[in-house]
Image: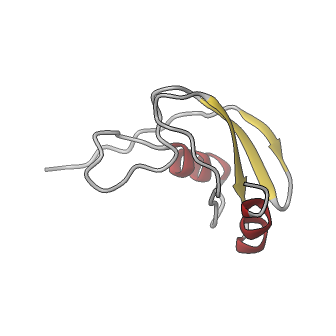
Amino acid sequence: MTSTLVTMQIPILHQDDAIVVVDKPAGLPVKAAPGDPYAADALHASQAQLGLAYLNSPQWLTAEASGVLLFGTQQEAKSALAELF
């Protein structure tokens, strides 16, 4: 079985040294778990699109939901965001 890299562009609403804010479309999980039927997820698509070594989110939206999603671009930022949720 071969894997296919899915390239998608997720709208970036804001980006600075600590956070990235994206507009997650419906039908896309935040992060696909092993065995999920999704070919892509918002975390990895955003990370590849922006060329960032680290990206993580304390926030969760279901795959069916669309909405604004916050990512920390470093562990310290992700931890600070986690306190807000």
Q: Can the viewer see residue 73 in this picture? A: no
> How many numbered marks, from 0 up?
0
The image quadrant of residue 76 is bottom right
Residue at 54%, 45% (x, y): give it. 45
- The image quadrant where one finds the C terminus is bottom right
Q: Position of residue 69 (x, y in %)?
A: 68, 42
Most foreground residue, 51 or 74 = 74
Residue at 69%, 53% (x, y): give it. 71
Q: Residue furthest left?
A: 1
Most foreground residue, 84 or 27 = 84
Q: Position of residue 27 (x, y in %)?
A: 45, 28
Q: Can the viewer see residue 1 in this picture? A: yes
The image quadrant of residue 52 is bottom right
Residue at 28%, 40% (x, y): give it. 37
Q: Position of residue 53 (x, y in %)?
A: 63, 66
Horizontal side, residue 17 vs residue 39: left or right: right
Q: Position of residue 50 (x, y in %)?
A: 67, 50
Q: Is residue 36 above or below residue 9?
A: below
